[in-house]
Each structure stands twice: as structure tokens, then as C-alpha cells.
């Protein structure tokens, strides 16, 4: 049999520090194998280092070494166990071990302790050293490359390195800033012929301490000692499994890594029989419900790559047959079988995604796997695709309606559009999509598209859509203006009880109110204030002025736009609009009370008005309310509440609020003083051209 050597280097770290008695230092112990799964001559050296001194000691490493020594004896290894060796004893004991492994089939080198990388080479740290600079490393630690060289000299054919000495350099504070060490984890190594290298963490990354997960071992060894003794699992499968378990437990904060130059598959415990024979035996046990006997056979066959066994092993974990129920493991085995094309595995994997069993609920992944199985003729999956698609459509339409009701139009629009274009939307959804296009909610305003979706909804007899078509005809939006057509559509809608359509029918003979409002707003937007003011007044005098029209009149009077400046008239119009719930008018009324424009100056009343509109998201009111809290105007001074309202407005992109928020962070008023945050908000405001913010940013950056 080809010679095999296994070099296993491991360091698992802990934050706790404990003193090591002198009796435990430099311990040397040889343990004989307890089992012999092969006829190979196997030897291992297992090293555990913990007593590095205050602030550097490791709590799990001796447990790791002792557990791995025990596991390796079960795999037919004569194990040399070394604990807390200084450099002199470590080198002496290793030299003796090198002599013992000459010509062996396998040799395992396992190290649990601190390690570091310097100028691209990896070093293992014994106890009792002080590394005051990186130049000390070469002469005070064990070079991993030298370990490989010594094993090669002894004609050990296959070398396996598993490096878990992956921790921040514990001596880095002594080295200063000139060190060339990366100071985190180990460097990648290229394996010479017949070598397998595995890291407990990716090169340049660090390993996790098991204590954080209530483990007596480091995370890597906890899983390694369980996987390595499983029969019929190749070395690649062992470390693939360990990688998956470690990554999942640590939320991908630690991901083991391996590199190999092996030319043949290696087993610690070779499969006793072919995967197919194992499967047939397991099936026989399963038929008789002898689950405890079937489980290990399914496991061996599954680990050897048999897709049917993988699917059935998933069922055992799913149902708790012959093993403790574990839905996460069930999904893992279903996934392996599904990846090999098993349609039954794909079907149940889809069900797990749909139900959230052993995996995060995800209907999109469920549909994907149902479709794969359906393409292979799986009837259950074909039916499930249709069923789940209907469920997803219903859920999407419900979610779109919720977004729409809550005025989250950016979220509602794509869902409405997707389902409407696919022919899945009901009349209400089509009408809502039309409203989005008509008003520019979540999409660029487009009257033509709005009219089209209103038309489709009206074909289903939806009264609101019929009314909206009437509005389009009355105003010439998306179609040519046609009062006759508008009247017909209003009548259809009103006939179904739509109040808005009934009101529109009453108003049509008197005045085209909406057309006048749009005309006035166009004048106002183009700063044709005299024309705008004239039309706004026409609407107001006819009793057709809505809240926004009253508010615009107030602005005209306040600023003298198109009319003589008149603060009292401004207050009157703002009050009319505010009474109708117009938030902007409430803010404008607050400004009048704050400045004493048209009314007696009254900060308390100003604050009252600002609160009403700020709560509705009106940014100008939020800024002014923040100013009142900041200065104690009309309300008790409260920097914290000032910051709260500034932030509300700042998040709406208001430069004044961003600047004010920056001053709070710079001065530490209402928040912890933080120049980084101050600079962040000053920059936001400066990017919008705020001159004060630009000056403040220059000041704080210098």
C-alpha cells in the first residue's frame, strides 16, 4: 500500500487565561492504537499548547489535543501526545518522533496552540518564548516547512497538514508598526507531492473559540473529531463536512480551507462494501422498520456519493428514524441528492424551502426546485409548481396592496406592474397601477399608461376605474379632452354607487374645476404669479378651492406673489387650508406665529402648528420644530428632541436640517460628540450647495 503521512496542525483559541502547573509542562506520552481499521502502519504526534502567559493563554487547546489523541488511537494510530512543551523539549520530542515514523504508511502531526505568519512562512509557537520582534520568530518557534522537510526525509509518502494556528498575533504589540507580519491568521501553503494541507480558517483569517458556543473544544476540532471517525468517508468529504458545519455555526465568520496534491482518494476507515450493496442492505432494514440498523448503512452509502442513499438519509434526519431529528441535516442531504438530479430529493427540498423546515422559508427557491423535479416528470412537483405560483401571486398582490395603502409606492409599483403584465392582477390592482402612472407614484408620470390600465380595469366593471377614465377625458390626460366621454364614464361609475363620480357629474355643467386648478398650478410653477393668483382667487370665490389652492393663495399673500403683500390674508388662507388637513399650510401658519406675521407673535402656538405637520412628515415643520427645541422657543429646551426632528428632515434630504444635525454632533448637543458624524452631515448639506455647511466642513476637517 502506498505510504501515507498525515500532518495535522491545529490551534483553537480561547479568551480565558488559566495557570498551568509545572507537572503538566513538557508532558510526553505514547498511547497505543485501540483499533486497526486498516493494515497500515500509522503514527501521530498530537501537540497541545496553552500556557503562554498572561493575556496569551488558551483554554481549549489541551482539550483539543487530548480528544484528538483519543480519536486517532481509534483509527489505528500510535499517538505521541505532547502538552505545553518549550522549544527545546518540543524539538527533542519531535526528533524522536521523526525517527519512529521512518517508512510509515501514515503520520499525523496535530498542533493546537498559537501560530503566526511572517514574510510568507508559517510558524508554531511553543510555550516560554518572548517574541519582541519578528526577527526572533525564526529562532524561537517551529517552522512548518521544516516539519514537512523532516517528514519527507523519513520517506513518509503522503503528508496531510491541517493548520488551525489562526489567531491574531499575540506578540504584535511588542513589534510596533514596522512589522511585516500580517498579524492575523496563517499564510497559504502549496502542498508538495503527496501532501494534503487544511487550514481551520481561510488564509489570513482567524479561528473561533468554542467557548462562545458552549463547547469545550475549538469550533473546528469539535466537528473534526466527529467526522474523522465515520466509516467510508473520504478525507475530502470529511473536510468538506467540517467546513460546512463550522461555517454554518459561526455565520461564515470562520471558513476552513484545504489544498491537496493527493492523486488518490484516502479513507481513514475505508468503506467495507460498495455504496450500492450498502444501500440494498439499508433498504432491507428500512422495509422492516429497523431504523437503527439502516441508518449507519445509509450514511456510509450517502457519504460515498450514492444519491438515493443521500435522499433516504435526509428522510431519516427529517423523521428522526435511527437518529435524533435534525431538519438542518435533512436539508443538507436532500440538497446533495438533488444536486445529483434526484427528482424525489428535489421535490422534498422544494417542500422544505416552501415550509421553512431546516432552512429559511423561501418560495422562490421552492419554485426553482419544484420546476427541476417537474422537468423530470415528477407529478407531485408539477402540481406543486401550479399551486405555489398561485399562492405567490396572491401574496404578491396582497403585499402590493399593503404597500399601496401605506403610500410605499416605490415598493408597490414593481409588484403591481409585474403581476398586471403577467395577467395575474385583478381589477383593483390594475386600477392602482393606473393611479401610480397617473400620479407619478413609484414611476415617471405617464398619463397614456395610466389610461390603458384604467381601461383594462374598467373592462372588469370596476367603478373606480370608470371614474378615473372620466377624469382622464375631462382633463385630456392620456386621451384627447372630451367632456361628453367624461360624462359617459362618470355615469357608468356613478351607476355603481361611486360617490366621486356622482360629485363630478354635478360639477361638470358648472365649471371644469380641475382644469382651472391645473392651469393655476402651471402658472405658479412657471412663476407667472399674477396669472396664478387670478385663477386661484377665481376658484376660491366660486367655492371650489381645495386645501392646496388655499395654501397657494396664502403663499402668494405672504410673499406678495401676483398681489400686494398681506400677512393677515396669508394667515386667513393658511388657516383655511390647515383646517382641511394640509400639512404644508400648518407649517406656514406656524411660521406666521413664530415671526408675528399677520398675528401676534406666539412661539407656543407656532410649536403647536409645527407638531401637527411634522408628525405627518412635513420636512420644513420638522426643521422648525427642531429649532424651537434647540433654542427653547415656546417649549422647554431639549437638544435630544431637536436632534430627533433634525434627523427626520435630514433623511428627507433637507440641507438645512443636515447642517443643523452636523452642528449637534460637532458640539455634542443632544448626541455624543462625534466629528465623524458631524462631517458626514456637513458634507451632505455642502453637496447641496449650503455655504455654512461648506465652511463647517472645512473647519472640522482641518
Image: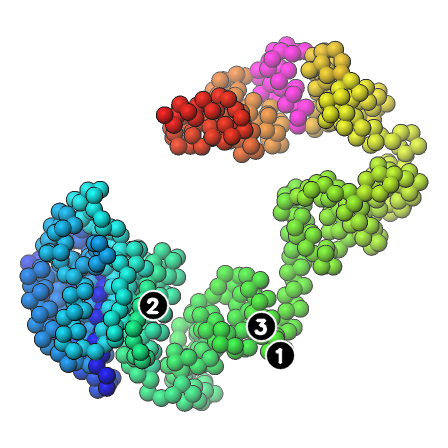
Q: Quadrant of the C terminus?
A: top left
- Element type where label 2 sits in the image: helix
- Report the span colored magenta: 583-609
Estimate the spatial distance between the alpha carbons at disc 2 and disc 1, rounded to whole Å.
35 Å
Residue 450 visible in this rendered orientation of the protein: yes
Query: Which of 446/302 is in front?
Result: 446
Residue beneath disc 1: 377
Estimate the spatial distance between the alpha carbons at disc 1 and disc 3, rounded to whole Å.
9 Å
Query: Disc 3, disc 2: CB below 8 Å?
Result: no
Apparent side of residue 465 relative to residue 233 in the rendered image (left or right): right
Residue beneath disc 2: 242
Residue beneath disc 3: 372
Query: Which of 155/317 is in front?
Result: 155
Apparent side of residue 590 relative to residue 18 in the rendered image (left or right): right
Q: Is residue 588 magenta?
A: yes
Q: Is residue 3 magenta?
A: no
Amino acid at each position: 500500500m502506498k505510504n501515507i503521512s498525515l500532518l495535522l496542525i491545529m490551534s483553537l483559541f480561547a479568551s480565558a487565561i488559566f495557570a498551568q502547573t509545572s507537572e503538566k509542562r513538557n508532558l510526553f506520552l505514547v498511547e497505543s492504537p485501540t483499533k486497526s481499521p486498516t493494515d497500515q502502519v500509522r503514527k501521530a504526534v498530537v501537540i497541545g499548547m496553552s500556557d503562554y502567559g498572561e493575556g496569551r493563554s488558551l483554554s481549549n487547546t489541551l482539550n483539543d489535543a487530548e480528544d484528538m489523541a483519543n480519536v486517532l488511537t481509534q483509527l489505528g494510530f500510535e499517538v505521541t501526545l505532547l502538552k505545553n512543551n518549550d522549544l527545546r523539549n518540543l524539538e527533542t520530542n519531535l526528533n524522536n518522533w521523526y525517527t519512529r515514523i521512518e517508512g510509515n504508511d501514515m503520520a499525523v502531526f496535530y498542533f493546537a496552540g498559537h501560530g503566526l505568519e511572517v514574510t510568507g512562512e508559517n510558524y508554531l509557537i511553543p510555550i516560554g518564548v518572548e517574541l519582541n520582534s519578528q526577527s526572533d520568530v525564526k529562532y524561537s518557534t517551529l517552522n512548518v516547512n521544516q516539519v514537512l522537510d523532516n517528514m519527507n526525509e523519513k520517506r513518509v509518502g503522503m503528508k496531510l497538514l491541517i493548520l488551525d494556528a489562526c489567531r491574531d498575533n499575540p506578540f504584535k504589540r511588542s513589534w510596533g508598526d514596522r512589522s511585516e507580519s500580517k498579524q492575523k491568521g496563517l499564510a497559504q501553503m502549496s502542498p508538495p507531492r503527496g501532501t494534503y494541507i487544511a487550514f481551520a480558517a481561510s488564509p489570513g483569517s482567524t479561528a473561533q473559540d468554542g467557548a462562545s458556543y458552549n463547547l469545550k473544544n475549538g469550533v473546528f476540532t469539535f466537528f473534526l473529531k466527529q467526522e474523522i471517525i465515520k466509516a467510508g468517508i473520504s478525507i475530502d468529504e470529511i473536510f468538506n463536512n467540517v467546513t460546512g458545519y463550522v461555517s454554518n455555526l459561526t455565520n461564515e465568520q470562520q471558513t476552513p480551507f484545504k489544498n491537496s496534491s493527493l492523486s488518490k482518494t484516502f479513507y481513514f476507515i475505508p468503506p467495507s462494501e460498495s455504496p450500492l450493496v450498502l444501500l440494498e442492505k439499508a433498504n432491507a432494514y428500512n422495509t422492516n422498520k429497523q431504523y437503527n440498523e439502516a441508518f449507519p448503512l445509509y450514511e456510509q452509502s450517502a457519504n460515498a456519493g450514492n444519491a438515493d442513499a443521500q435522499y433516504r438519509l435526509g428522510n431519516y434526519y427529517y423523521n428522526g428514524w435511527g437518529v435524533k431529528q435534525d431538519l438542518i441535516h435533512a436539508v443538507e442531504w436532500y440538497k446533495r441528492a438533488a444536486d445529483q438530479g434526484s427528482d424525489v430529493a428535489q421535490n422534498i427540498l422544494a417542500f422544505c424551502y416552501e415550509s421553512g423546515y431546516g432552512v429559511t422559508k423561501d418560495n422562490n427557491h421552492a419554485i426553482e426546485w419544484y420546476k427541476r423535479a417537474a422537468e423530470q416528470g415528477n407529478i407531485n412537483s408539477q402540481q406543486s409548481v401550479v399551486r405555489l405560483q398561485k399562492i405567490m401571486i396572491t401574496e404578491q398582490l396582497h403585499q402590493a396592496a399593503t404597500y399601496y395603502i401605506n403610500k410605499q409606492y416605490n415598493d408597490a409599483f414593481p409588484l403591481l406592474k409585474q403581476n398586471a403584465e403577467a395577467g395575474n392582477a385583478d381589477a383593483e390592482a390594475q386600477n392602482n397601477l393606473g393611479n401610480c402612472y397617473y400620479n407619478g407614484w413609484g414611476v415617471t408620470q405617464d398619463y397614456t399608461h395610466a389610461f390603458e390600465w384604467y381601461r383594462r380595469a374598467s373592462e372588469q366593471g370596476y367603478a373606480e376605474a370608470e371614474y378615473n377614465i372620466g377624469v382622464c377625458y375631462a382633463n385630456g390626460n392620456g386621451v384627447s379632452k372630451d367632456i361628453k366621454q367624461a360624462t359617459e364614464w362618470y355615469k357608468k361609475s356613478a351607476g355603481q354607487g361611486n360617490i366621486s363620480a356622482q360629485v363630478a357629474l354635478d360639477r361638470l355643467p358648472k365649471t371644469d374645476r380641475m382644469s382651472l386648478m391645473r392651469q393655476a398650478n402651471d402658472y405658479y410653477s412657471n412663476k407667472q404669479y399674477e396669472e396664478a393668483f387670478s385663477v386661484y382667487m377665481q376658484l376660491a370665490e366660486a367655492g371650489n378651492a381645495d386645501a392646496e389652492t388655499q395654501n397657494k393663495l396664502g403663499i402668494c399673500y405672504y410673499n406678495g406673489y401676483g398681489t400686494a403683500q398681506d400677512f393677515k390674508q396669508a394667515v386667513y388662507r393658511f388657516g383655511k387650508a390647515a383646517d382641511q388637513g394640509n400639512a404644508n399650510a400648518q407649517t406656514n401658519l406656524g411660521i406666521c406665529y413664530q415671526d408675528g406675521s399677520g398675528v401676534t407673535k406666539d412661539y407656543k402656538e407656532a410649536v403647536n402648528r409645527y407638531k401637527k405637520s411634522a408628525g405627518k412628515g412635513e420636512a420644513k415643520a420638522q426643521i422648525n420644530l427642531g429649532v424651537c427645541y434647540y433654542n427653547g422657543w415656546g417649549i422647554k429646551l431639549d437638544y435630544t428632541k431637536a436632534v430627533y426632528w433634525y434627523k427626520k428632515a435630514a433623511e428627507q434630504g433637507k440641507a438645512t436640517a443636515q447642517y443643523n444635525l452636523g452642528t449637534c454632533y460637532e458640539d455634542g448637543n443632544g448626541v455624543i460628540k462625534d466629528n465623524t458624524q458631524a462631517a458626514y452631515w456637513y458634507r451632505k448639506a455642502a453637496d447641496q450647495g449650503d455655504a455654512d455647511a461648506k465652511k463647517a466642513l472645512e473647519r472640522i476637517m482641518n
